[in-house]
Amino acid sequence: MGFFDDKQEWLAEVFAQYPEDRRRSALMPLLRRVQQEEGYVDFERMKEIAALVGTTATEVAGVMSFYSYYQGLPTGKYHIQVCRTLSCKLAGSDELWHTLSERLGILPGEVTADGRFSLQAVECLGSCHTGPVIQINDEHYVERVTKARLEALLEGLMQDKPLEEVRRSLPDEDKMGKATIELEGGEPS
Amino acid sequence: MPKVKVNDRTVEVPPGTSAMDAIFHAGYDVPLFCAERHLSPTGSCRMCLVKAGAPRKGPDGEWITDESGEIKIFWFPKLMASCTLAVSDGMVIDTLSDEVRHAQSGMVELTLANHPLDCPTCDKGGACDLQDRAYEYGLDEKFYTGPTGEPVYTRYEFTKRHVDKHHPLSEFIILDRERCIHCKRCVRYFEEIPGDQVLDFIERAVHTFIGTADEGLPSNFSGNITDICPVGALLDRVARFRGRNWEFEQTPSVSVDDASGQYIWIDARSGRIERIRARENPELNDIWISDAARFGHEWADMDRITTPLVRKGDALEPATWEEALAAMRRGLEDVDRTRIGLLLPGDATLEEGMAAAALASQFGTGYLDFEGRTAVPATNFPAATFASVLEADYILVLGDPTEELPIAHVWIHKRLRGVKMPQRLNHGTPVADLAIREHTPPDGSLLGAFAPHPTRVMEWAASRGVFAPGQAAAFLAAFEAALAGREPEEAAGVSPEAVKRAAESWKSAERRVLFVGAEVLMDVKAAQLAEKIAKSQGAVVFAMTPAANARGLEAMGVWPAGDARAPRAVFTAAEDPAADLLEMADFHVFHVPRLNDKVRRYADVVLPAKTPYEKRGTLLNVENRLVGLEPAHVRAGEAEGLVQALALFASAAGVEPPLRFVRQARARFLDRYKVNLDRLDPYGTIWRPRVSLAPRPLSQEGNLYLKPSMWKARHRLGEAAGRALGVLELAAHPETALAEGLDEGAVLEVETPAGALSARLVFDAGLPAGWFYLPAGVPAMRLPFRALVPRGGEAS
């Protein structure tokens, strides 16, 4: 069964927002809906969307791959996105990436055995002054991710505490925004 | 018209011209990678940077002047990509200053930064835009010097990006992602020309690569991307590693694979055809050719007969021409000359047709025919040029242009996208035509498409339908009724609403174009109805004949006439004549390039023939355009042309040959029709022959429907084509198949005129019930449905 089979009304609403001959424009809302509900966009879904908006699976794949938001493979409960653009890189995002990858034992595209974590490198998250930055799922930023903060974060997530609560209880969370935290988790000077 | 000053020259160009074309028009050069004729300009490579400026008018409507009273030029603050910059009156463009050259050399450097520079092993080497531009516009000692003042030509001291280097996109196209410079020509090409968006950019920024999610580039026009790729990223896999560009002998010729006569280059090396490329003809095929024309050449080099063969007992044995002549004399000794049959291939040239017709009249035989002939002569229909498609207000298609006349698919798509014939400038077709836009959806209201099976153009058409094979006449009758204002009945499976919609659009249009495929042309009643509708409504018709030179042969009088007494001896230059014709005769002379089962079984004498790639001759295409074949350098032993073979056959029959050489035929043609076939216009000469021939029906019945296919029987012989096509698909409506006890996926043996083929059964609910469909590389045909034997046991 297709994903949109029982969403005809919603589809009609979305298509109504674009001119009749520009149905391709509805590509993004459709992709977003699938991503939100299923956590990733399967190839079968791409083909379904392609047929609905009148294009090819290739174009859907092209649009999808442009945005790091869309996933082609299933993700974990906590999808960790590590910024790898310049500022974060200078602040040590490479080390952060390797630490995370080793600690969780996964590579991009994989999910930890308990289904909790998946990992992705993304481009600039727009918080260059507080690098290295990671984003968890759609809403949560964790900034200045030092080793100590990372440990505390993973610890909290392992216990499935609410994300916001975990973030607030991270070491040095009160000093965020101040340029004084040592990256390796030492005492602030 | 805006006046533009390019460096020191002032030119006038039509409004809307791009600065790039103004520069070329003025005779200057500007480097480019992403702009391409017939594609939308996008300015993605930034190679064509120029300094540009324009005067401005003040509030008083007068040009603003500087202190000295001269009209002041307001320069754009940065260098501009000339391909996306439209000219304006008084614009000044500078392409020669150091500022521009410095920027261009910087762009070359950036483009080369991640390019592997493996030119010595690259097939594009020697014909590569990037090579040429790097030489012309690359780093200049003027701009870069080392610490001691020595010129610097390269600054590549870092590791290059390494990605997928041998990525087959399909059996015919291979992609080298390291060489790709992301000009997007191939992506735009697929979207804008055939309308199959099967390639796209995947990922973004430095990670971007060209890729597809659809299996094996499902398009009949995939090969063109290898021509337009400015680097060696997209390569013709059939021709890969078969020669360097400077080793090929390049022959300008035309393709005989369909009735359009697409312009091609034949690249041969050491007597072997290695590659076919598109040759520009802005009136016919622009710079595009179909995949069949490009990749279907391997058969030309396969198992050629290099000497005459004469039957000795059961075997055909090599012989000299003298022995072959003697054998023909013996065979024709007591054959009544009026009972000799002559059969030509559908791609026989005008000259060959003339020789055959002259010989037939000398024999006094009426049995003169050609392969792929339609029941109704194509010359009955008022033809027009492809350019008229762009002017059409309504296009009605009865058939499958994508398969039957591939280039028509491109013209129809152009019309639906609203593309006009481009202006011709000093350098030809505009390189960056700002009138062409990316992502223009096709306007389906201009198109009605009906066929016995779902077609590619149907996807665009506002009114469309699938009728049962053999019911073209019923459909046309319903269409005619709707035109006359009567309420149409359901026509052979097509809904009356669709017929009515099509008829209304047709009626309200001023300029109408009708495409009729073999399905209509094979059916006398349907063809006459179509002719009547077209002529009474002043429509022009593209009769998509299976034979490449149907019009030319008809004009030369190659058409069966008189009584139908069975011929006793047959001369056939067709490779696959009908078995019943061969059964009728006792003596068979074959003039073919290659042996096949029929030749082995029936031939008494075999004369080695030239393939169309080796001939000099002329075709009359679907538009009534004379286009010329030129012989490529192919090693073909003692192969002779058809005119010579016919002359030999004539003397064997004791008749003075009416024509011995192509040259004589051309002289006679000039004498008779005042057209010099030696001096055709570069893009072909329009010639409207006056022909009146009576329809001659061909027997057709059965419920196996052979769809015309771009991949004609002989193309399948090629290794690459064979691999790509794999197992054929026999399609049927699920109910029809299940009624025969056949499930989807069953692999079957299917009997066809082209021999037994292996096919896999697929269900297609869009097909009319009661029929089996097979793309078979022959004219649309209906055959008795033969027992189909599942291979490897029962279907699962």
Image (cartoon, coloured by chain):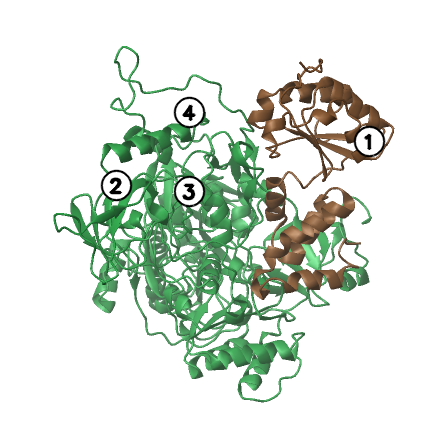
Chain colours: A brown, B green
Circle 3 residue: B227
- Kind of residue indicated by mark 4: Leu
Q: What element carries label 2?
A: loop
Q: Which of marks 2 and 3 is nearer the N terminus?
A: 2
Are the residues flagged by discs 1 and 3 in contact, CB closer than 8 Å? no
Circle 1 residue: A116
Nearer the viewer's eye, disc 2 or disc 4? 2
Callout 4: residue from which chain? B
Residue at 66% x, 76% y is B495
Seen in the picture, residue B397 relative to A52 is either above or below; the reply is below
Residue B114 x %, y %: 46, 27
- Kind of residue indicated by mark 2: Asp
Q: In whole angstroms, how far apart are the C-alphas of marks 1 and 2? A: 59 Å
In the rendered image, which quarter is residue B498 located in? Answer: bottom right
Mark 4 crowd level (few <14, some 14–19, many ≥20, 10 Å Cα) = some
Nearer the viewer's eye, disc 3 or disc 4? 4
Q: Which of B735 and B596 is in front in this view?
A: B735
Mark 1 crowd level (few <14, some 14–19, many ≥20, 10 Å Cα) = some
Q: What element carries label 3?
A: helix
Q: Which of B276 and A96 is in front in this view?
A: A96
Circle 4 residue: B117
Whether residue B755 sits left or right of residue B635 in the image: it is right
Circle 2 residue: B29
Residue extending furthest toward the right: A159
- Kind of residue indicated by mark 3: Asp
In this rendering, do the residues under marks 2 and 4 share a single chain? yes
Q: In whole angstroms, how far apart are the C-alphas of marks 2 and 3? A: 21 Å
Q: Which of B526 and B307 is in front in this view?
A: B526
Nearer the viewer's eye, disc 2 or disc 3? 2
Callout 2: residue from which chain? B
Whether residue B296 sits left or right of residue B657 in the image: it is right
- Kind of residue indicated by mark 1: Arg
